[in-house]
């Protein structure tokens, strides 16, 4: 192998047969990460990628320096009140990870967070957990659970030092600093305390990495942990939490299309969890606990069918705790408004929803309403920027007289705001600092609409400098995802400035399969309509070309995970539209993965992609679009694929096989590169400085491929 020649993967024919169709997979041998030959191949690909990108080393250093110059490295979050303490995090220049801290409140009526001071400690400040100390000696570190007991005495926390998302749970005495011998390995990451602080609940996963079991652990007691709940159906994940009122423990069980919620009074931690409405195939719901007119209710967000009409974009009901049969509707279904959540506080109900392809938040003040609120009682929290994201912030106290709100946009750094609902007064507690004299007025964001082949209007968001010369095509990065109802919402990015300031336009394609335009937007981009996701992205790219935003020689596409599937499919549909494609942890061998129920997360994914193992129609449909299955000799643009050896969500195998085949058949001569992190998981490297270096690596390559370097 030379600098200009990638390593050649050997071919080992491995036939598979499904529904009468036999496929010979010559690169399936790359699945075994315990095979030294596989590791050698990945390292050889890393060396090739390093050689191909060596000329960008100085640019990468410049971008890292730019990110650092704009970032307040020694910083502190806005304190959030919970119980008798203010909780917050500190970051310190030169250290990779945050330190979690707390300080006592001055009194029960103290709702004004203490002044954020990065150079001085707050009175009585103590360290809960220093992640830098926990990460010492490890190449990778991730914090899972971080949960303080209601009496403030105990901290349950969990850590992953491999990247496989299996966490070790520990319990710390915050009064003495002692870490108890109660060490629980192989947990799913979360932890919930009982009201009396005697028990901690946690989750474990099955062999397919699916959270499936809830356990109850008695702190300091040398007795076996009690299995509280187990979900045998492989289509369902299990989660656990509490209501905002802290009066109920909640177990949530859900597939992609069906949900069930079980509750238990928090003052009865050894009792039995009870299902609220059972499990009905195709019905999703979540709940919160509210007190309205002195009576206890469960507020249920659901998509049930009423009078022959399904609440596709969800509705809200209230269910008396003491009389579930008296359930009634509070907010009806409206196809123009996708309801996502209702948070219940002592004096307020907070509605989180999506309208006009942006997230919104509205509040009902229960003190001003007789009886039950209706949709007319919810007042939207409005901001000046049209393309913006607003939502409920960190609000741990059910009885808080004010609400914490978060706001950001493509050009506005994140703001933390305290809202006095009664008066409407807003107090800006913090605006994300962007050092170096950032001027938001130097940038702008606009929304355009591409028209898909079937006539569907697809939203596109664009961010760029106001002084961009629009008389000629510009370098452009087009980003997409389009799965799981995930939305590409407006948000600020410090690192993005390194692109914008070099004349690059950043575009976001809100394709079907995401959730920006409501539940049907998602439904029309999954299972047997999945190809809409890919063709929407291609149509957005063509729209940008037709509108003169860019040219094929200046456009790069990017997507990760399921967005990496999008990248691979688009490369097979229209490789001529792009000068480069960045695919991070790409799900490009989707058919092989979804055919194998022994692989992590496969069975639960059948509701998203279909079940090709048992359904020949799904098999044929997936085979027609899966990137790895459809690589053919053609002129592919330059490709950078990134993966992680310990990823449990999208195995490194997928990117490795895909790149091997692309390198074998591409007729363009453009470099096709694979970069594998050898000690990381699905989220890539850990530690902010390593993450900045990884970001700089990607941005430098994007700048090169868009022609922004001149």
Image (cartoon, rainbow, N blue to C red):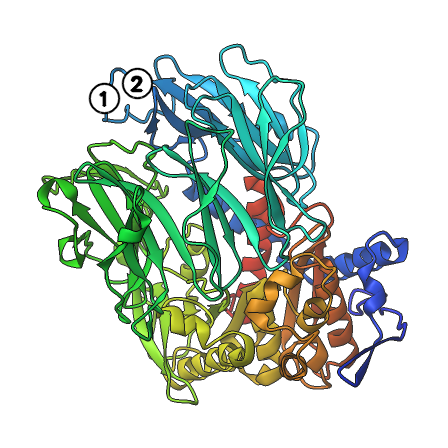
- Specify few, some or many for label 1: CA neighbours under 10 Å numbering under 14, 14-19, or 20 or more: few
Residue 438: x percent and y percent? Answer: 32, 48
Is 232 left or right of 497, judged from the image as shown?
right
Question: In which quadrant of the rendered image does the N terminus lie?
Answer: bottom right
Q: Say which of 162 and 602 sits in front.
A: 602
Count of numbered marks? 2
Q: Residue at x 35, y 27 (%)?
A: 82
Q: Is residue 92 visible?
A: no
Residue 43 vs residue 257, the one in the foreground: 257
Foreground of the two, 218 or 144: 218
- The residue that disc 1 covers is 110
Q: Which residue is mark 2?
A: 105
Residue 65 x %, y %: 51, 45
Q: Quadrant of residue 472?
A: bottom left
Give the residue at the far top of this rendering.
Answer: 176
Q: Where residue 50 sits: x, y (%)?
A: 72, 57
Q: Is residue 560 visible?
A: yes
Whether residue 123 is situated above or below residue 531 in the rendered picture: above
> Which residue sits at x=90%, y=72%?
12
The quadrant in which residue 672 appears is: bottom right
Q: Are marks 2 and 1 in contact (CB under 8 Å)?
A: yes
């Amino acid at each position: 192998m030379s600098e200009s020649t990638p390593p050649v993967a050997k071919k080992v024919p491995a036939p598979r047969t499904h529904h009468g169709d036999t496929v010979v997979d010559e690169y399936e041998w790359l699945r075994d990460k315990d095979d030294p030959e596989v590791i050698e191949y990945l390292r050889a690909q890393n060396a090739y990628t390093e050689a191909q990108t060596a000329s960008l080393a100085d640019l990468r250093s410049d971008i890292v320096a730019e990110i650092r110059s704009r970032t307040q490295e020694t910083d502190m979050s806005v304190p959030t009140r919970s119980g008798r303490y203010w909780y917050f995090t500190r970051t310190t220049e030169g250290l990779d990870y945050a330190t979690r801290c707390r300080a006592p409140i001055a009194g029960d009526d103290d709702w004004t967070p203490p002044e954020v001071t990065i150079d001085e400690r707050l009175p009585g400040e103590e360290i809960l957990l220093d992640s830098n100390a926990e990460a010492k000696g490890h190449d990778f570190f991730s914090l899972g659970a971080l949960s303080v007991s209601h009496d403030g005495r105990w901290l349950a926390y969990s850590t992953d030092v491999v990247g496989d998302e299996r966490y070790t749970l520990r319990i710390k005495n915050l009064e003495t600093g002692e870490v108890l011998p109660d060490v629980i390995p192989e947990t799913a990451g979360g932890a919930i305390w009982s009201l009396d602080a005697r028990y901690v609940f946690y989750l474990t996963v099955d062999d397919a990495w699916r959270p499936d079991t809830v356990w109850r652990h008695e702190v300091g007691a040398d007795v076996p942990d009690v299995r509280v709940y187990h979900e045998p159906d492989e289509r369902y994940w299990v989660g656990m939490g509490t209501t905002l009122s802290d009066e109920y423990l909640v177990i949530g069980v859900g597939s992609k299309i069906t949900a069930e919620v079980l509750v238990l009074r928090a003052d009865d931690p050894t009792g039995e969890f009870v299902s609220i409405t059972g499990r009905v195939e195709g019905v999703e719901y979540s709940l919160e606990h509210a007190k309205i007119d002195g009576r206890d209710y469960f507020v249920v967000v659901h998509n049930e069918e009423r009078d022959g009409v399904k609440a596709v974009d969800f509705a809200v009901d209230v269910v008396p705790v003491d009389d579930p049969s008296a359930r009634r509707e509070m907010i009806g279904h409206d196809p123009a408004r996708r309801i996502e959540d209702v948070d219940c506080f002592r004096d307020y109900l907070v509605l989180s929803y999506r309208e006009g392809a942006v997230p919104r938040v509205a509040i009902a003040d229960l003190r001003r309403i007789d009886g039950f609120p209706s949709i007319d009682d919810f007042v939207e929290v409005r901001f000046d920027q049209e393309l913006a994201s607003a939502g409920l912030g960190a609000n741990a106290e059910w009885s808080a007289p004010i609400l914490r709100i978060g706001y950001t946009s493509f050009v506005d750094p994140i703001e933390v705001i305290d809202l006095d609902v009664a008066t409407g007064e807003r107090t800006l507690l913090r605006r994300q600092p962007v050092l170096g004299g950032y001027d938001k007025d130097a940038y702008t964001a606009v929304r355009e609409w591409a028209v898909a082949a079937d006539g569907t209007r697809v939203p596109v968001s664009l961010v760029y400098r106001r002084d961009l010369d629009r008389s000629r095509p510009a370098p452009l990065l087009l980003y997409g995802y389009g799965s799981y109802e995930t939305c590409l919402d407006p948000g600020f990015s410090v690192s993005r400035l390194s692109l914008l300031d070099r004349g690059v336009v950043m575009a976001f394609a809100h394709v079907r399969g995401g959730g920006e335009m409501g539940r049907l937007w998602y439904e029309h981009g999954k299972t047997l309509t999945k190809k809409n996701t890919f063709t929407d992205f291609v149509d957005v790219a063509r729209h940008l070309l037709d509108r003169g935003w860019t040219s094929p020689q200046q456009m790069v596409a990017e997507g990760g995970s399921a967005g990496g599937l999008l990248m691979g499919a688009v490369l097979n549909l229209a490789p001529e539209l792009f000068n480069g494609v960045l695919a991070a942890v790409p799900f490009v061998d989707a058919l092989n993965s979804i055919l194998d129920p022994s692989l992590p997360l496969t069975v639960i994914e059948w509701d998203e992609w279909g079940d090709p193992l048992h359904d020949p129609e799904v098999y044929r449909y997936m085979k027609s679009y899966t990137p790895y299955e459809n690589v053919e000799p053609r002129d592919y643009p330059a490709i950078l694929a990134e993966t992680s050896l310990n990823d449990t969500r999208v195995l490194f195998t997928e990117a490795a096989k895909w790149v091997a085949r692309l390198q074998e058949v591409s007729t363009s001569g453009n470099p096709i590169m694979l970069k594998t992190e050898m000690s990381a998981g699905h989220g890539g490297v850990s530690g902010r400085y390593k993450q900045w270096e990884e970001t700089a690596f990607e941005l430098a390559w994007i700048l090169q491929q868009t022609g922004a370097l001149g």
